[in-house]
Amino acid sequence: MTHDELERALAELPFRLLRGLGRAIAGPPALRMGKRRLIHTIVAGAEANSARIEATFRTHQAEQGALAAGPAPAGGASSEHKSGNPADLRALLEGIGVPEPRPFVPDDWQVEAVEALERGDVIVSVPTGSGKTYVAVEATRRAMYEDRTVVYTSPLKALSNTKYTEFCKLFGPEFVGIITGDRRDNPTAPILIMTTEILRNLLYDAAGGEIDVRLDTLGLVIIDESQFLADPERGVVWEETIIFCPSQARLLLLSASIGNPHELAAWLTCIRPTPCHLVRHQHRSVPLRAAYLHPNGKLTPLFRTVTMPPSPSQAVLHPEAKRLFTLFEEDTVYARRSG
Amino acid sequence: MPPSIHPVHLVTVLRQKSLTPAIVFLTSRRSCDEALQAFEHATDPLPPARQENITAVLDELTAAYPSLQDHPLRRMVTACGVAAHHAGHLPSWKIAIEELMRRGCLDAVFATTTLAAGVDFPARTVVLTQSGVRRDQDFTDLTIAEVAQISGRAGRRGKDSVGFAIVTPSPYMDLGVLIRGLTGRPEPVDSQFIIAYPMVLNLLKAHPLDHIQSILAKSFAQYQMNAQAAHLEHRIEKLHAKLESYKPRECSDWLTQWNAYDHATRQTAMKLQARRHHPPEVRARLPFLTPGRVVAFPRFSGIVLRRYRSRGQRHETVTVLRKGGVVAESPVADIMGVIDHTFAFAPAPAFPWATTEALSWLTQQLEDLPKHLPFLTVPPAPDDGEGELVKSLGDLFPCPSCPCRPTCAKEFKAANTVKQEWLHHTRTVQSLRTGLWHKFQARADILQDLGYLDPAFKLTADGEWARLIRIDFSLLITELIRAQAFKDIAPSTLAGLMACIAYENDRPNSFPRISGVLASLVATARRMAEALAAYDDPPLLRADVGGLAERWVGDATLTWAQLCRATSMAEGDIYRLLSRTLEYLSQVHSLQSTHPDLATLAAEALSRIRRGVLEELP
């Protein structure tokens, strides 16, 4: 092949291949070269690298061939590429729907928590929606048998109201009272729903010498959403409530999954007369799956596995989700720049 | 391609894949409302059977919450089966939406991420559209606990065999944050213990001052700080052992002495710097290098014409006349010796630094000088800088004569680093162990100064009632009561002021005008808050929000709809403002025994606030 022929042939190669070739011949400076200079460099070094140049031409031909022959046999493959892997999506959406109705059987941890409450304080740290309420209700029922007052606190008035309605249905409205900053219904009932601030204030008054029958017969204090302890403004109220909680009452702390339940349990054991039992698990009662929905309406699994990866380091994105998200980012970046 | 998926499209896709009901978490109330608006004409209405279902549930709830009757969004929800759920709505509306979701009547609810904790209803699917959340003025990433809270809503027990968390991108979304949130371990819960004035008063009411420290020690804050302190103490022990390894010495506190020396050296370093650059023997010669002095260089000798130091140069230079009339510059350090011979000549202000006649005369003299002339013996200058320094330190630095001075000098730097770290940790441990108690004492001292506590830290008469005010800004409110600011005012004015103190959001809105009395009362409160600023963070004290509470309390015929029309504030916010005002007023109401007039006033305001929408709900 003469220099001129080689030059013409090279000019038809895609830039990507030219650059690879240039880099092999001239090293990293080739990465900064334009097409014309690359061709010159390659032609100049052609004699010493003829094998490599030929290999590049072969690669190019193979690619061309694949492209030309592509649509016919690989039609399914390319549409599959477009829509991701339908098998993966089917696996993701499999089993969707209403489960077989099963008689309610409490989980082991729920039973464990209720039993442990007989012996001392209990912290329950389980994922949202896995049935903390069952523990609260069961513990309340047991305290009721023993003629003890139960106080149930939650951080938000709205949650208190929901719980009030729920407990009224379970135990009958005459046994349930609610006290919040602006509502007082049946405040001498054996089961009292209140915001944590109200309980703190009751404990303040009791410590200040005002006699409160409710606190004397107090058998159980349920503190819902106790991860609010870390709230920058209101967290202190949770702490005070726990510190001042009468020693004859049992504490039941219900919280979502938190990072350091052991520390909380160790603290409670430290300051309370009875040791604190920790009930925790990461298992969701309804399994969770993650999906990615592209703005064009295309749904793909988010992770390579159907189940959730156990830790961020093991979270591998589904290739299709990754591709689409990259595409989205490129589009929005471009839109932002031009806009 | 649109920047993020259109809400109607989103719900259509979810319906197709039977992923409904879903909760779609958006960043702001506005985006929730806009998403809902998008359904107005975009979709076919629900099948009549489902619409009837929704209507039935709503009608059932209307019995308990009359405000649902004419709710403007009612038609929309019934027709499309989608709803918005955010803090801008009335609690009754939110309860209705939650109930509809629980019964599975709705396909999608658009909710704000900020209120993820308040969204207490499950769905089959949650849709995450953002990785950040607005907090105060900032936009911060969702924490793992928050993402867990959100994804925890996916999958209803007994109704779903699988729950779904769907991520759909929007501009500025960080997928990494969501992946971490979905798969990571939640953050630890850390104590946020703060010592507020009501706490101090209530603790001192129940316990004598000497018991307080043991009560504070029971806090989780102290527990965590103790753990931290124990960790540091372990490190301190290690550092101590390291320090021990430097012993034995002549003196026990060599580090202190050397530290004093090091400190003094640093202090005088600047002054010494100029002189330091020449070795002592060169420095000793400097006074002799006057114009006319004969000096010897290694190869030749010459006569000094002038001595100078250029700006920015460290070394002195001399201009020297050499044999043959050459005038040249040389650094003083090159001079080999000073010769005991000088010539008096007439200097000139510029090159060649001597008059022409003097120059030729000097050249002549130089030629005539004998070859070998005796050098002046100049004793090297004492290292006066350091000497003085050591002298000035006196007893602080007795080391000069100490036999182990060289060892000390060598090891001082490393040992000092260890010692400083040790000191730092020791101080940290101390503040960790006693910090809470000191903070409590500081607060108690302030309360003593203000007259709520007597010299023995028992509650005074003022303290006895002030401890019943257990809300934010309690100090401001009790001080206002003591200053009789609430004398002879109407219940509406009191409610207005409480609203101003209670409302802490700086979202701009338009409000009804406030009365002159309230304006002057707010001004008084503001002055008081400024005076108390050193003791307590002042409240925002927006005067404009007071207008709402004032009107609601002042005009008993005002309906909720009329009140909402008077302001651009969202319904839910007005409700929250009034219900917080209610809380504050009921605190004031608790002062019946000591301030009967004020309590009556508060009671009247309370009874007037509790009507209409505020009565139907807790």
Image (spheres, coloured by chain):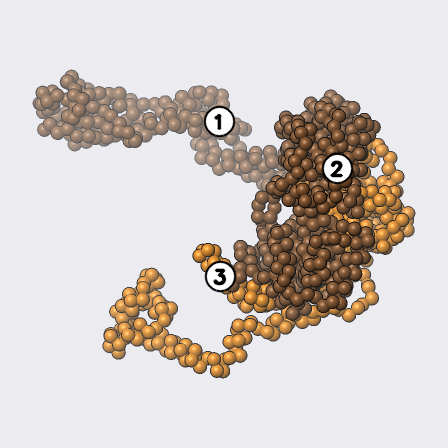
Chain colours: A orange, B brown
Q: Nearer the viewer, mark 1 or mark 3?
A: 3
Marks 3 and 2, Cα distance to the nearest angstrom? 56 Å
Q: What element carries label 2?
A: loop
**Total tally of numbered discs in the picture:** 3
Residue in view at x 76 percent, y 64 percent: B52
Residue in view at x 59 percent, y 38 percent: B236
**Please, what is the three-letter code of the amino acid marked with disc 3?**
Asp
Can residue B494 be seen here? The reply is yes
Marks 1 and 2, Cα distance to the nearest angstrom? 75 Å
Disc 3 residue crowd, few under 14, some 14–19, many 20+, Cα 10 Å: some
Q: Mark 2 lies on which chain?
A: B
**Please, what is the three-letter code of the amino acid marked with disc 1?**
Ala
Work out whether mark 1 precedes mark 2 in sequence or the reverse, and give the earlier one: 1
Residue labelled with disc 1: B260
Q: Is mark 1 on a helix, strand or loop?
A: helix
Vertical comparison of B488 with A127: above or below: above
Q: Which of marks 1 and 2 is in front?
A: 2
Q: What element carries label 3?
A: helix
Residue B533 percent across, percent down from the top left = 63, 29
Could you tell me which quadrant the N terminus of chain A lies in? bottom left
Residue labelled with disc 2: B555
Marks 1 and 3, Cα distance to the nearest angstrom? 64 Å
Report whether A275 appears left or right of B363: right
Disc 1 residue crowd, few under 14, some 14–19, many 20+, Cα 10 Å: some
Residue B384 percent across, percent down from the top left = 36, 22
**Please, what is the three-letter code of the amino acid marked with disc 2?**
Asp
Circles 1, 3 touching at the beta carbon (< 8 Å): no
Residue labelled with disc 3: A331
